[in-house]
């Protein structure tokens, strides 16, 4: 039996964020067992906590979707750090937890809320016109709805589209059957004085839920791409509105590092039995 937690991430309201399943002490599990459990939970991500293998890491994590393993993802990072600390984990540094994952070492800052340091881009820069046209078509947009487009891939493979406003973001009607391997995030500003600065949506069919409720990696990529230019230097993003969630993502670039934070809350705890 392995300790297990399910953590709600990115919302101060119960059951309004994005859940992640966290399995503790998973060093003895095989890849097949991890993949099978991730498919069974049918959450956007399931994580497995293991002993670190590199100096400087407090713990190691493997992050799985129902469709396969990811090198990095944001809300599983915050949920895993929350679960590890709640289970009695003691980091080497009091104010930062260091997570090891296939993308490298990721700092998770402790404070009013947990916040992770967005990893560097694996792919960035302009989007090819054919790829952009495909994204516009499958999202049900017009070409002139896109203010700016860029690759903002910090692990999962995101293409980012800046739309003129939050209403255009909420009005997207994606054709998920036509996405192929596309993973695209859209962002649009709310009017000045609104509860949040922007509305964000993340579309990633084939890797879990067709639309991810609240997405840390995408918000980190958007912050690195647009914060301080098209968007405020620091801001709060809303996500999950069309899914009846109330995600709130705090984006705070500091000295070239984009910190992405949110509330975390354990909603389920117990033990997990995974048979052969």
Image (cartoon, helix red, strand yellow):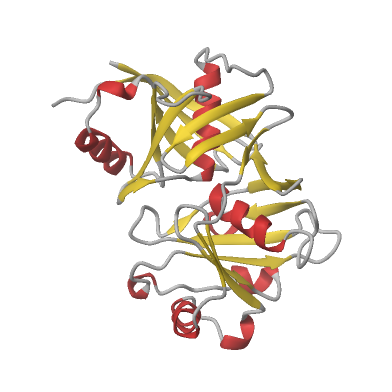
Left/right of residue 150 with respect to residue 194 in the rendered view: left
> Please, which residue is most extreme toward the left here?
276
Quadrant where the N terminus sits is: top left
Is 120 rendered above or below residue 32? below
Residue 188 lies in quadrant: bottom right
Residue 39, percent across and down?
28, 43
Left/right of residue 273 with respect to residue 152 in the rendered view: left
Left/right of residue 163 with respect to residue 53 in the rendered view: right
Quadrant where the C terminus sits is: top left
Residue at (74% x, 29% y) in the render: 112
Residue at (53% x, 42% y) in the render: 75
Residue at (62% x, 41% y) in the render: 117
Q: Nearer the viewer, residue 91 or 207?
A: 91
Residue 191, percent across and down?
81, 66
Residue 104, percent across and down?
48, 39
Is 102 rendered above or below residue 238? above
Residue 250 in sight? no
């Amino acid at each position: 039996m392995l300790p297990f937690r399910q953590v709600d991430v990115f919302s101060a309201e119960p059951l309004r964020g994005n859940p992640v399943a966290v399995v503790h002490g998973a060093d003895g599990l095989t890849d097949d067992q991890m993949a099978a459990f991730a498919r069974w939970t049918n959450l956007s991500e399931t994580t497995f906590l293991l002993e670190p293998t590199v100096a400087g890491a407090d713990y190691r994590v493997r992050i799985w979707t129902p469709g396969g393993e990811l090198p990095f993802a944001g809300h599983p990072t915050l949920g895993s750090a929350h679960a590890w600390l709640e289970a009695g984990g003691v980091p080497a540094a009091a104010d930062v937890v260091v997570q090891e994952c296939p993308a490298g070492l990721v700092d998770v800052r402790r404070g009013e809320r947990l916040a992770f340091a967005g990893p560097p881009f694996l792919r960035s820069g302009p989007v090819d016109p054919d790829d952009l046209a495909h994204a516009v078509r499958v999202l049900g947009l017009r070409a002139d709805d896109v203010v700016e487009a860029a690759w903002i891939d910090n692990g999962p493979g995101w293409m980012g589209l800046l739309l003129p406003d939050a209403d255009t973001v909420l009005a997207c009607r994606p054709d998920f059957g036509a996405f192929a391997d596309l993973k695209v995030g859209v962002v649009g500003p709310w009017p000045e004085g609104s509860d949040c600065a922007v509305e964000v949506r993340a579309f990633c069919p084939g890797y879990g839920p067709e639309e991810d409720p609240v997405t840390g990696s995408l918000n980190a990529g958007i912050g690195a791409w647009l914060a301080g230019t098209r968007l405020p230097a620091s801001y709060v993003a809303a996500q999950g509105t069309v899914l009846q969630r109330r995600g709130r993502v705090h984006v705070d670039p500091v000295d070239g590092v984009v910190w992405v934070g949110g509330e975390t809350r354990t909603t389920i705890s117990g033990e997990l039995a995974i048979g052969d």
